[in-house]
Image (tube, rainbow, N blue to C red):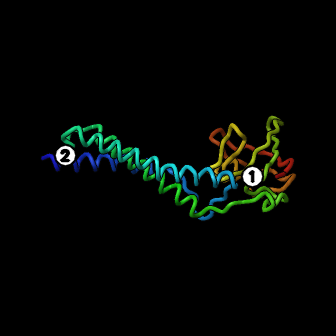
Amino acid sequence: MGLFSYRFCFLKSITLIIPKAQKINVMSGINYLTREGFERLNSELEDMKSRGRSEAAKAIAEAREKGDLSENAEYDAAKEAQGMLELRINDLEKQLANARVMEISDVDISKVTVLSKVTIKNKANNATITYQIVSESESDLKAKRISISSPMGKGLLGKKIGDVAHVETPNGKLEFVIENISI
């Protein structure tokens, strides 16, 4: 009976982990990164492999000492946390394996590409804003860095100064005029 409960809890943990794994967005093919972005991901990976794994192992060992594993919620939580840590490590390893570090000198400013800064004007309200196009792992809307795979990023990619980008949003289709492209 105890073994059956353990398997049930283990399967329950797997069931909880799988949907989260499906939400991890890893771009197929090349993952374009800045030097800083590459170093940040590499640092996070090394930290998770060393400190993160040792903390997870310690938490599992402490929970295991508390008795019957079949009814030990702390043990189940520690195992689930370990599973999530391993998923994140796997995700980072995939991103870094497919990474291509882009240098500023590699950026073609004749059209919108990864790492270019693009100034756009909304045709509906004439609002002007500048975004930098980056990879998913480096996107930060507050810093005006948008992902190449976002609807806005996809709509702007490949456009030249003067082109109109059509972007599909939940509120409908928006049109933006490309005013400037820079590094």
Number of numbered markers:
2
Q: Which amino acid does label 1 sit on?
A: Leu
Q: Residue at x 56, y 58 (%)?
A: 95
Along the horizontal axis of the image, is 9 left or right of 146?
A: left
* Image location of residue 113, percent across then percent down: 75, 57
Residue for badge 1: 156
Tell me the quarter of the picture where residue 157 sits. bottom right
Q: How far apart are marks 1 and 2 (CA)?
A: 53 Å
* Image location of residue 72, percent across then percent down: 24, 38
- Residue 22 visible? The answer is no
* Image location of residue 40, percent across then percent down: 62, 50
Q: Which residue is drawn at 47% across and 53% down?
A: 49
In the structure shown, which secondary structural element does the residue marked by tag 1 occupy?
A: helix
In the structure shown, which secondary structural element does the residue marked by tag 2 occupy?
A: helix
Classify mark 2: residues with Cα within 10 Å, few (<14), some (14-19) or many (20+). Answer: few
Classify mark 1: residues with Cα within 10 Å, few (<14), some (14-19) or many (20+). Answer: many
Residue for badge 2: 5
Q: What residue type is labelled 2?
A: Ser
